[in-house]
Amino acid sequence: MKLITPEAKSHLAETLGADFRHDLKNDGVSENEINRLVNRSRNRIISAPLIVILCADASEMDIYPDTKRKKAEYIMAVQSVANAGMQLLLAIHAEGLGAVWTCSPLFAPDTVQNALDISKTWEPQAMFLIGYADELPKSKVMKEVQSLVKIL
């Protein structure tokens, strides 16, 4: 585990913002919209009291000689990180805090590794912005369970 200092958080926000800006320009997004989106992202990162970056550690994976099992091992690692993320969100909620799960590390893993000086074997998978919620989200209408399940 590595603690993120305010300076490192700011550096992370700036470097991720630069990557985001580049991608949005390549997508043909207007300069005004790019500025709005990049500033929103930067402010969310900087204002978060706590940031957690979840990573898959490639050095901990089993090694297989064939492509099929290599792929399965990698998918299992990604699923494990996602499961840890879900558990983290439940723990955060249980403590009366709020969190946002962002996938920006998936789009810029090298940027996250370099900005935070983390091991190259740690593949960033998710970033959690954690703090007290300003407001509660609106409730969503949930689908009926029967529409999501097929009983065999």
Image: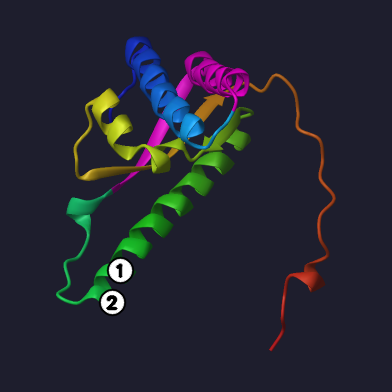
For disc 2, the marked residue is 68
Compared to residue 77, the image places residue 13 above or below, namely above
| Above-or-below relation of 81 to 11 | below
Q: Is residue 124 left or right of 141 when viewed as pictured?
A: left
Residue stretch in magenta: 30-56
> From the viewer's perspective, is 138 left or right of 19?
right
In the orientation shown, which residue stands out farthest toward the bottom?
152
- Position of 75 with respect to 88 (left or right) is left
Task: Tell me if I can see residue 131 in this picture.
Answer: yes
Compare residues 61 and 106 and report the one nearer the observer: 106
Q: Is residue 63 left or right of residue 90?
A: left
94 or 39, which is in the foreground?
39
The answer to whether the residues at label 2 and label 1 have Cβ atoms under 8 Å apart is yes
Q: Residue at x 17, y 52 (%)?
A: 59
Amino acid at circle 2: Lys
* Secondary structure of the residue carrying numbered label 1: helix
Mark 2: secondary structure: helix
Res 63 → quadrant? bottom left
